[in-house]
Image (cartoon, rainbow, N blue to C red):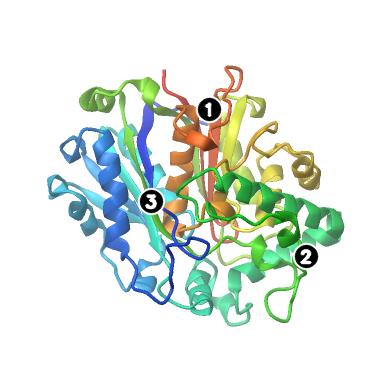
Amino acid sequence: MKKLRKKVYMLAGYNTISMGTGRKEFNPRKERPGLEHYIKEAGQATLKGIGGAKNVDEGVIGNFMAARFNKQANLPAFLPMIDPDLKYKPSISVEGACASGGLALASGIKSVLAETADVVLAVGFEVQNTVKAMYGADILAGAGWQKERKNGHAYFFPGAFSDRAGAYYEKYGKELTRKAMAKWYCNAIENARLCKTAQEYQNTNPNLEATANTPLNPRRFVENLNVFDCSKVSDGASAIAIVSDDGLKRIGVPASEAIEVVGFAQVAADITQKPEDLTSLSTMKKAAEKAIEMAGISLDQIATVEVHDCFSIAGIMATEALGFAEKGKGCEFVLNGNTSRNGKVPFNTTGGLIGWGHPTGATGVHQAVTVWEQLTGKAGAAQIEISKGKPFAMSVNMGGDDKTLVAIVYRRGI
């Protein structure tokens, strides 16, 4: 695995509110902000942290389905809308289903490594609350193989991960797995309550465990998941700057205020093929292994992880794919408190996809923003302790059913 040929940093991250059901401000019957609102809010906030648009060399926008949710394409041309000084600068958009945000980060990293840019503005967004949930599920099914859509579940991706959960129940025990999935949900909401931009920030439910254990109802939803095992429909955007050493000098920010990318991997698997093993996230495993190898570190040096828990079962399986738990031992790893905010390796400290929200094209960027906040001590009430012996963090962004993956390893800039 090749090492990075030069230093790459991220800084000045910003998240809009993840808007949707659960937020008191959200009213599905009233007109809501459009995609331009979210892109501008996130983009302008990051520009403010790097001395303005004049310092930006190029931009990249991560998005999954604006062409269908919002009937809007040609997304690169939204970059100059953020600030007039971005006019006539290079801009691209990238799409890889729910890993679109991660692809935006990877694109910016590659531009810095290729020395075509010293400062890249990366923005991810999605505005999904424009259609009813059933129609939205059909749009999101585009993250899978379209020839399977005809015979797939009405709720296509909940159906796919229901199948994974069912296989996991059969192989490792339903009761234990359901307990771990409930624990994952509780951790997600508890963490989201500490982050003001989280979709579940205002969740005051006094009995999260009972909610997590809502009985499965295959007649109304899917066979092996309840609705609380699922990430929500969300509107939102996240932005961060990706810069070189020269970029840091240009914007006048010390490396200590940034995070350094020390390893990353972008991998894909054949979308036309079904998973070989429903109980394994094999593509996520490969991405994580490559990123960690490039970083030259061990797992016990990682202080915190942002992982793609589109469904609670995906969170359990991710602990195994990343190597923190042995195959089939993810449930025990979670139930023993290892992934909680005070655990061995806190996962998703602002709630992850289930707690913070999942505006699909923004998720990978949101993960990086959360890591930046944690490693630089800017996470506010959601801050965890970062010890000197564990100076690294990791994010893993997944598109589709383990098909497009971006994994990144970071440490605080020095």
Residue drawn at (21%, 51%), measured in percent from left and top? 82
Q: Using the image as rendered, state which of residue 335 and residue 331 is in the foreground.
A: 335
What is the distance, in whole Å, between disc 1 and disc 2 at their CAs?
A: 35 Å
| Residue 89 image point, x, y percent | 16, 46
Q: Mark 1: which amino acid?
A: Ala
- Height in image: 114 above or below 270? above
**Residue in the foreground of this view, choosing between 118 and 175:** 175
Label drawn at residue 166: 2
Please tell me which of labels 2 and 3 falls first in the chain.
Answer: 3
In-image side of 84 versus 373 (left or right):
left
Residue bearing mark 3 = 16
Q: Position of residue 161 (x, y in %)?
A: 67, 64
Q: Secondary structure at mark 3?
A: loop
Q: Is residue 300 left or right of residue 6?
A: right
What amino acid is found at the position of numbered circle 3 in the picture? Thr
Residue at which label 1 appears:
295
